Image (spheres, rainbow, N blue to C red):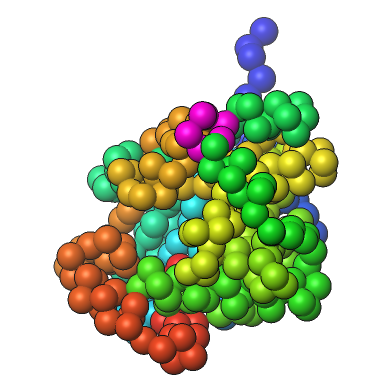
Amino acid sequence: MNAPFSLTREHVRTANLREPDEAARIEAFVATKAGSVFHRPAWLRAIEKGTGQRACGLIAEQGSAITGWLPLTEVHSPIFGRMLASSGFAVEGGILADDDSTASALCNAATEYALRLSCTTIELRGGPAGVGWEVRTDSHCGFVQPLAGDDDAQLTAIPRKQRAEVRRSLKNELSVSVGSGAADRAAHYAVYAASVRNLGTPVFPRSLFDAVLDTLDADILTVRHEGEAVASVLSLYHGGAVMPYWGGGTMAARYLRANDRMYYALMLHARSRGCDRFDFGRSKTGSGAYSFKKNWGFEPEPLSYASWTAAGHEARDADPTSEQHQSRIALWKKLPLPAANRLGPIIARGLG
């Protein structure tokens, strides 16, 4: 007797994320594939609500079954051009597929879709890529580590030098609060905006943080000194892991060791919420943030990113470490904070 075979061919189409049943089917597929929070339609919708960049995606199906998913954000920027990002404003979110042939079909469909939208670039943040795409594994690393079983064990798990910094922070007059209310959001945005301005980076619109907090499992942990917020982080919770995603500190945070207190407190808070892993996110390989995370005992894992550029066009460059942006970064660091906070969101919503 011959083996059974399917008479239904696989096909790829654009997803309708505004249809609740469609979004629910994709959410279930992402969960089955152990995808990241950035693969979720909920993430794409939050990005759209917070930045105005359109949520979209490509879905592969065979009969009634989903066989592949490519989450996409259509990003428009007068400075950096138009692109499809998988996934927008994310560090992960590439193709999820049952097999290589499905992944290949999604890549091919993505290039056709990009051209129809006049997007000259596609960025895949993880997952397989198509033939002829530029793939890099040396630009960024991820950092994930299990959480310890109790507070003392968590402190002991931190390497000696960094543990000493945490102990010093515990002796300082710092208070820690966690929440997602109006006061938490205002404190976080004030600290984060000052932090990224000092790094020479435009701040994201506050509406982005509000949309993520309103749509996903997320909260804000803030460290204060004498009642003033000096460090704050907005964290995402997904699949048993906590990811401190948008965080920073004021100038005072360094001598107060407020950032050290913040991340240690987040580890304890995440465990109390039932998390078993601490995902420190990605950092540019060899950067200061990369070294900081290694100091905490996290081992870097190279990340794979792929990009496609339409024929006749230059590759998109929104990398803050590239040479062409250094003069802009230096100028941005000198901007008064109110001016940076007014202009930053206009630019940052196009970074993707």
- Give above or below for 65 relative to 220: above
Foreground residue, 36 or 119?
A: 36
- Give above or below for 151 relative to 284: above
- Residue beneath the point at 51% across and 29% down: 160
Q: Position of residue 222 (x, y in %)?
A: 69, 63
Q: Is residue 53 inside the magenta stretch? A: no
Q: Position of residue 59 (x, y in %)?
A: 59, 52
Foreground residue, 82 or 234?
A: 234
- Give above or below for 172 relative to 248: above
Residue that extends furthest to the top in the rendered view of this protein:
1
Q: Quadrant of the N terminus?
A: top right
- Residue beneath the point at 55% across and 54% down: 257
Tell me where the magenta segment starts and ends, as one range. Answer: 158-163
Q: Quadrant of the C terminus?
A: bottom left
Magenta-drawn stretch, dominant element (helix, strand or loop): helix
Left or right of 180 in this view: 140: left
- Residue beneath the point at 57% across and 72% down: 191
Q: Which of the 4 image quadrants contains residue 185?
A: bottom right
